[in-house]
Image: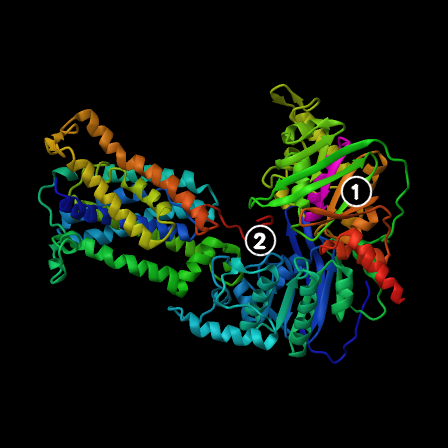
Amino acid sequence: MDILVILQAGVASGTVLLFATLGEILSERSGVMNLGVEGMMLVGAMSAYSIAVHLGNPWLGLVVAMLFAGIISQIHAFITITLHADQVVSGLALTFVGTGLSLVLGEGLNKAGTVALLPTLSIPLLEHIPVIGDIFFKNHSIMVYIGYLFIPLTWYFINKTRPGMHLKAVGEFPAAADSQGIKVYRLRYLYVFIGGMLAGLAGGTISLAISPGWFSELTTGGQGWIAVGLVIFAQWNPIRAAAGSYIFGALRRLVLDIQGPTMLLGFANPFFYNPYLGFFLQMIPYAFTIVVLVIGSQEAMRKRIGAPAALGEPYVRGERGK
Amino acid sequence: MVDGNPLEAAETVVKMRGIVKQFPGVVANDHVDFTLYRGEIHALLGENGAGKSTLMNVLAGIYRQEHGHVYIHDREVHFSSPRDAIMAGIGMVHQHFMLVPSLTVTENILLGLDEPRFVMNLDRYDQAIAALSEQYGLRVDPKAKVWQLSVGEQQRVELLKMLYRGAEILILDEPTAVLAPVEIDELFLTLRSMVANGKSIIFISHKLNEVLAISDRLTVLRRGQVTADGIPLQGITRRDLARLMVGREVIFEFEKQAHATGDDVLCVENIWSKNDKGLDALKGVSFSIKAGEIVGIAAVAGNGQSELAEVVTGLRRSSKGTVRILGEDFTNSPVRRGIQFGVGHIPEDRTHVGTAPNLDVTDNVIMKNYAREPIGHGMVVDMGAAHSFAKDLRALYDIVVPNIDTPVRLLSGGNLQRLILARELSGNPPFLVAVQPTRGLDVGAIEGVQRLLLKQREEGAAILLISEELDELLRLSDRLFVFYEGEIMGEITNVHTNDDELVEQIGLMMTGTRMDELHLETEGASHHD
C-alpha cells in the first residue's frame, strides 16, 4: 500500500467522477436536475467499448458514447422541460432505461478479446516535479489530462462568458431570462444534452481508459450517484467539483488497497481479505457521499451560494404565483 | 365609454385594437382598445384582476392575444416573444422584478443582448451603465449583486435595463407598490425626465392619488373591458376615477359605530421576543384588547409588529412575559391551541403563510376546521361537507374563482385575501390578528376587507390590526399603539381621521419620540402660534 499509488490512482478514477460531475453541474445550473447520470454513464461505457471492439477506434468510441448518452438525456429533457414532469422521478427512470439499454446492447461484449484503448502518456518536464509530478503528470491516460483542461474551461464558461451568464439566469430565474428574450426551454434542452454527453464521456473514460472493459452494471458501480452527490458538495462550482472528484477517487482506491497488506501500521490488518469487512469498506465511499451531502448543503445555506434557485422547477411562462 | 381626443397633433406610438385574451375560466381582456401617444405618461387604471397586466403582457410579447391587432408606429406587429417586443422598442418593468439575484447589476442589464458576443468584458460595460445611470439620475452601483440592493434600487436597475436597450415605450406595472414615499417622489422625477427625452410611458396602477399626480391621460379597465379610453386628466376627481374603476360609488369614509366593549380578550404583559436574527424584537410590551375593540399598531416595517403578531398567535416564542387570551394563559402555546380557542389570523404573507398555493380552494378553506364536525369525523374528512362548506364561503365572501377545485395560486390578490378572510372569520373568532390585511389590494377590495373587519368588531371580536397604512389604522382602530424598535412609544385613545396634528404626532412617535417627550415638543410649538 503506497500512498503515492493511491493518490495517482485517485486522480485517474477521479477523472471519471469529474466529467460526470461537471456535466451534472451544467445541467443543474440550467435548472434541470438529472438523476439519470448513472444510466447515461453505463450507456456511454457500453457504446464506447462496443465501438472500440467492433471498429477498433477508441476515439470514435468516445464520440459515439457522448452522442448516445446525450440523446437518451433528451428523454429526460422532454419529460421535465416540455411536459413539466417531476425531475426526480424522470431522472430515476432514465437510470433504469440507461442501465437496461446498456445491458441488452452490451450482451457478450465482455468476451470480446483485446481492444484498442486510449493512449497513456506522461507530460514532459512536469512529470519530474517531485510528488506532484508523480501524482498528476506521470503515466496517466490522456483522458486525465483532458480532465484537467475541462476544470478551468468550465469555470470560465460559467462565470466569464455570455452563454454562461444566460445559463445561470435560466437556472436562477427563468422568468427574468424569458422576459429578455432568452429561450429558456432551448437552453435547458441544450445543457441537459451537454450534461448527458459529459456523462457519456465519463462512461467511455471508464471502459476505454481507467478500468478498461465491460462488466455490465458493475462497470460504473454507482459512480453516477456519487457524481450527483458531488455536485452538491461542489456547490455547483467546477473547481470544488474537481477537488471533490479527486478526493473521492483516492478514497475508492484506498478502500481497495487497504485489503492487500497483511500488516497495517505494525498491527495485523483486520481488513486483510476479510469478506465481511470488505463489504463494509466498499460501503464507505457511499456513506461518505451522504455525509458530504449533509455537510455540503449546510455550508451552502451559510454561504448563500447554494443551489440554482429554480433547480427542479419546471418553467411555465406567465403562470401566476411564482 | 368616455372618448378623449386631447393631443390632436400627437404622434401615435402604440395602437391596440379589439384585444381578446382568455385564461381558463376567465376573459382577462374582452375587446380592449388602447392608444399611446409619444411623450405622454398614460395611466392604465383598474382593480386587481381587471386585465391591466394581461393587456400589457400582450404588448410586451409575453402573451399572445386570441383576437385583435397591435400597431407600433402605425405598423401592425406580431410579437412571438418578448425579444420581438424589445426589438420594437417596448420595455416592460414588471411588478415582480425580472432580475436574477445572483448576477450583478451590469450582468442583469446585459442579459439577453447580442453584445457582448462571448467573453464578458464587464469593466467596460460597468462604465457604460454608470454613465447611463448618471444621465437619468438612476443611482445604482453597476458592480453590486442584485440581491444586495434595496427594492428601490432594483427598480432603477429595471429602468436602466430598458433604457440600455433603447426602449422608447416603457411599461411600468405598479411601480410604486413596493416603494417608500421618498422613493416614489424620486421615481416620478425620473419618469418626467424620461418623457422630456421623448419616451412614452404606460403607468399601470390602482392607486388613484398617484394616477392623478403623474399621468397625462388615462385608460380604465373593469373586468377586462375598457370603461374610459384615453381620457385626459383635467377636471377628473378621485371619486370619478373610483367609479370608473369599480363601477359604483366607493365610499371613502364610513362611520364607525360607537358601541360598548366587553371584557379583556387579549392581555399581553411585558412580552419580550427575538427576531429571526436572534436580536430582541419586542422589549417589554404590555397592552390589552377588549371584546368589540380594534386596536391598531402603527410602526415602520421591522419595528417588532410582525413578531408581536406571531407571538400572540403562537408562531413565535416569547423569551419573557405572558400572553393571556380569554383569561387563560397562552404564553408559548402551540398554534393548534390558538385555533381551538378560535384565534383568527390574517397573516402578512398571503401566498406562503396564508395559503398553500398548490392546494385548491376547498383544501385551503378547511385548513382550520378539517378535524371538527361536520367536516372531520375522526380520521376521515368528509369531502362532501368540505365542498359544500367551500361553496358557501365562496358565495358569502364573493370569491371569484371558476370552481372550488382551482389551485389558489391562480387567484388574484384580492380574491386570495377574501379566501383567507372567509376561512378566518367564518367561525366568528373571539380574537383576530390582522396583519396588513389590505396591502396590495385595490380600492374596491380594500373597502370590502375593512367592512368585514368592522363587522367582526360589531359582533364582539377583539381585533389586533397591524398595518403600515396610517389611513387604514385611523379609520378602523378604536385605540392605537405606536411601536418603535420593539417598544411602545405611546397610546392614542382618541382616534379620528383627517387630523393632521394627530398624524404628525404618530409620525414623530414612529421615528422614536416617546409620547411624554412629544407633549413637551408640541407645547413648545404651540407657543409660536
* Residue that numbered label 1 is attached to: B295
* Residue B78 in sight: no
Figure check: B85 above or below A102: below
Residue occupying the point 12% across, 34% down = A260
Q: For the view shown, which residue lies furthest in the bottom direction?
A: B9
In this rendered view, identify the residue nearer to me: B167 or A96.
B167
A223 lies left or right of B492:
left
Residue occupying the point 44% across, 50% down = A303
In this rendered view, identify the residue nearer to me: A286 or B271.
B271
* Residue that numbered label 2 is attached to: A318
Q: Are marks 2 and 1 on the same chain?
A: no
A39 lies left or right of A145:
right
Q: Where residue A83 sits: x, y (%)? A: 47, 45
A267 lies left or right of B323:
left
Q: Where residue A322 sits: x, y (%)? A: 57, 49
Question: Which residue type does callout 1 highlight?
Answer: Val
Q: Secondary structure at mark 1?
A: strand
Q: Which residues are magenta?
A: B413-438
Q: Where residue A218 sits: x, y (%)? A: 22, 36
Figure check: B327 above or below A195: above
The N terminus of chain A sits in image quarter: top left
Q: Where residue B166 sits: x, y (%)? A: 56, 74
Q: In the rendered structure, the residue with mark 2 lies on which chain?
A: A
Q: Secondary structure at mark 2?
A: loop
